[in-house]
């Protein structure tokens, strides 16, 4: 596995090293040599083909916003579908399958998110090998088929296989290349672009939730699923055409990029993703039930979810802006710590509905930073041409975290909270997110030490890098 030749962190080192008077001449020679290596690598990468898929455009060019916005729209139909499953869950539990345990119906939504993330170990590698657009079109076909087949399902197990398993796998074919596009096209504004791209999942959660509820009320589940399938087919088919790569794929003899697993950075990113996904979904899944326990209505629960998604849409973009200014890992570390500080007291001590709205706004704006920032960290630390493969392998741990968190939180709510409160669920969620922040702190220092060892940077430069990484 080779490092990206245009690593912004390394450029920061070269710039920061010049501030030390005692090492100024050495810093100049290192900076000059590094610049020459970047120029040589860039020249070797440039091609003159007419296909945007096979040529290297300059980073931060205006053209990069076209595929980035296409990713944002497609994220509405992948993560957006997952975020809005609560509407279907309420319908199935109270109308279509009133005698079926809630834990059984929860498997549908769990499979959507878990498989979308964990299957990207295959779909990400496939995207790097056969191309982003062909991979995304496979996802479009599978997602459409999942909705149509689910519309003919009359048993819970049929919905688990169609709306759960098949939709999750199909979403993975779209999701895997989507995570890699924005970080490829931008360097100076990489965080902002990634934030805009992933904001689609929250925006999708907003309109998916409202539209699904309206269609279920007027048309029923069967035609709601069919209409969602047709919309998914039409919109994603157009967006997939705009999935251009900036960095051309390298020739590959194998499907998977096993070199990544030899690096500690990969395992730290993976462990952080596992931890944060284990704790992250607790509020999304249980905020509606919390409102009911405090005397609210089902509409209050729906409104809280809308506020949560709206805050998340804003927060994911703001996270990218902050990350561009203060560093990706620094932003991730602060956001994970603040998430715990916000979640535990506001949720645990809430006696009325009002604090829950404050919680949803703040949690939505701060907690999803990891979704925006992690692809940027991977793009900075690994070869951009293999970004979908590496991110796909790391997302296996995200999927395991989703499964572990959902099952554990349900069991804790039943056994220890007695379905009367959420104290133990909140503690479980907060501790895993806090552990993710600890892993992020370790990763931050590991990356700085690695760069120090490779570049021989001065103490002043090291302090500068700790502020910007």
Image (tube, grey):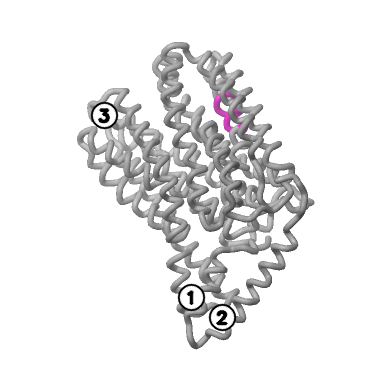
Q: Earlier in the sequence, mark 2 or mark 1?
A: 2
Residue position marked by numbered label 2 in the rendering: 27
Residue identified by numbered label 1: 461
- Residue at 48% x, 75% y: name it: 461
Q: Earlier in the sequence, mark 1 or mark 3?
A: 3
Reply yes or no: does residue 447 show up in magenta.
Answer: no
Q: Residues within 10 Å of mark 3 (few under 14, many from 20)?
A: some
| Secondary structure category for the residue under label 2 | helix
Q: Residue at x 56, y 23 (%)?
A: 231
Q: Report the quarter where the N terminus lies.
A: bottom right
State the CA–CA distance, disc 1 to disc 3.
53 Å
The residue segment tinted magenta is 162-170
Displayed quadrant of residue 86: top left
Disc 2 vs disc 1: Cβ atoms closer than 8 Å? yes
Magenta-colored stretch includes residue 166: yes
Label 3: state its secondary structure: helix
Please identify the dominant SS of the magenta region.
helix
Picture layout, residue 92 above or below residue 463: above
Asked if one can make out residue 103 in the rendered structure from this viewpoint, the answer is no
Residue corresponding to mark 3 = 293
Q: Residue at x 23, y 26 (%)?
A: 295
Q: Closest to the observer: 233 or 286?
A: 233
Residue furthest to the bottom in view is 22
* Viewer can see residue 297: yes
**How dense is the environment of label 1, judged by Cα within 10 Å: few (below 14), some, or many (20 and up)?**
many
Is 347 left or right of 255, judged from the image as shown? Answer: left
């Amino acid at each position: 596995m080779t490092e990206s030749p245009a690593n912004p962190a390394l450029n920061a080192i070269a710039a920061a090293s010049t501030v030390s008077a005692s090492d100024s001449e050495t810093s100049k020679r290192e900076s000059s040599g590094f610049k020459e290596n970047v120029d040589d690598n860039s020249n070797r990468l440039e091609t003159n083909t007419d296909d945007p898929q096979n040529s290297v455009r300059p980073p931060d060019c205006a053209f990069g916003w076209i595929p980035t916005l296409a990713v944002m729209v497609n994220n509405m139909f992948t993560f957006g579908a997952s975020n809005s499953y609560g509407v279907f869950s309420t319908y199935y539990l109270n109308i279509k399958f009133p005698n079926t345990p809630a834990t059984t119906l929860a498997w549908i939504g769990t499979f959507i998110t878990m498989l979308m993330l964990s299957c990207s170990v295959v779909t990400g590698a496939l995207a790097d090998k056969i191309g982003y657009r062909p991979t995304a079109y496979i996802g479009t076909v599978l997602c459409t088929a999942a909705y149509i087949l689910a519309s003919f399902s009359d048993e819970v197990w049929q919905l688990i296989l169609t709306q759960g398993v098949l939709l999750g796998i199909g979403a993975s074919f779209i999701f895997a290349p989507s995570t890699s596009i924005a970080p490829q096209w931008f360097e100076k504004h990489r965080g902002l672009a990634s934030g805009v791209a992933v904001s689609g999942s929250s925006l999708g959660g907003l309109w998916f939730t409202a539209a699904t509820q309206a269609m279920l009320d007027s048309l029923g589940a069967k035609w709601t699923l069919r209409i969602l399938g047709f919309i998914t087919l039409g919109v994603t088919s157009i967006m997939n055409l705009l999935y251009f790569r900036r960095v051309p794929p390298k020739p590959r003899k194998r499907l998977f990029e096993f070199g990544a697993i030899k690096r500690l950075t990969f395992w730290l990113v993976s462990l952080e993703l596992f931890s944060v996904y284990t704790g992250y979904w607790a509020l999304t899944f249980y905020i509606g039930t919390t409102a009911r326990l405090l005397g609210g209505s089902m509409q209050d629960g729906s409104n809280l979810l809308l506020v949560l998604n709206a805050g998340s849409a804003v927060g994911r973009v703001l996270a990218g802006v902050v990350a561009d200014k203060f560093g990706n890992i620094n932003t991730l570390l602060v956001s994970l710590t603040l998430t715990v500080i916000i979640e535990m007291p506001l949720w645990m001590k809430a006696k009325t509905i009002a604090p829950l709205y404050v919680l949803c706004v703040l949690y939505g704006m701060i907690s999803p930073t990891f979704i925006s920032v992690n692809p940027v960290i991977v793009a900075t630390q690994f070869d951009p041409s293999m970004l979908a493969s590496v991110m796909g392998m790391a997302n296996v741990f995200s999927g395991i975290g989703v499964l572990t968190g959902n099952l554990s939180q349900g069991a804790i709510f039943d056994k220890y909270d007695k379905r009367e409160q959420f104290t133990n669920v909140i503690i479980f969620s907060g501790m895993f997110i806090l552990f993710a922040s600890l892993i992020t702190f370790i990763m931050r220092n590991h990356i700085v030490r690695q760069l120090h060892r490779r570049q021989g940077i001065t103490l002043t430069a090291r302090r500068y890098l700790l502020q910007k990484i």
